[in-house]
Image (spheres, helix red, strand yellow):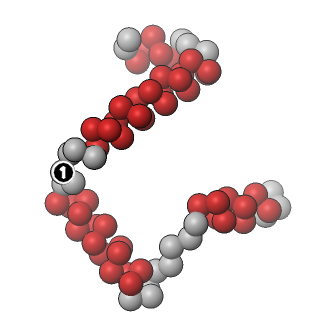
């Protein structure tokens, strides 16, 4: 199936394809080494968190915070 065929599908079918692709990519990503630029970025972010310069926020908490803000 090519991208132009996907564009013509109903949303629910697009979501099914997207979920299948995501699962496939996840299984391959665990076997693929990280590019050096990505590893370096992750290391610098981890260091910033460890040194207290950055804070990690739980996604569920962030989502609740965003949903409670007026639009």
Q: Nearer the viewer, residue 59 or 67?
A: 59
- Give residue 34's quadrant in the image: bottom left
Pointer 1 local density, CA inside 10 Å: few below 14, some 14–19, many at least 20: few
Residue at numbered disc 1: 33
- The residue at 72%/61% (across/down) is 64
| Left or right, residue 39 beside residue 67 | left
Q: Position of residue 58 (x, y in %)?
A: 58, 66
Q: Secondary structure at mark 1?
A: loop
Q: Is residue 58 left or right of residue 17?
A: right
Quadrant for residue 24, please give it.
top left
Question: Percent position (x, y) of residue 1?
Answer: 38, 11
Picture coordinates of residue 30 (x, y %)? 28, 46
Judging depth in this view, the residue of 17 and 31 nearest the camera is 31
Q: Is residue 7 above or below residue 28?
A: above
Q: Quadrant of the C terminus?
A: bottom right
> At which x and y percent is residue 43?
28, 72
The structure residue drawn at horizontal position 38% and vertical position 84%, both measured from the top left corner, is: 50
Q: Quadrant of residue 21?
A: top left
Q: Residue at x 31, y 67 (%)?
A: 42
| Numbered-mark total | 1
Is residue 1 or residue 21 the one in the foreground? 21
In the current view of this chain or complex, which residue is farthest to the bottom?
Answer: 51
Horizontal relation, residue 56 to residue 65: left or right: left
Q: Is residue 59 above or below residue 50?
A: above
Q: Does residue 23 lie above or below 35 as drawn? A: above
């Amino acid at each position: 199936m090519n991208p132009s065929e996907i564009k013509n599908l109903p949303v629910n079918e697009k979501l099914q394809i997207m979920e299948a692709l995501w699962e496939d990519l996840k299984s391959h990503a665990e076997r693929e080494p990280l590019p050096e630029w990505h590893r370096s970025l992750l290391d610098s972010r981890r260091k910033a968190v460890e040194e207290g310069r950055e804070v990690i926020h739980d996604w569920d908490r962030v989502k609740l915070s965003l949903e409670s803000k007026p639009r």
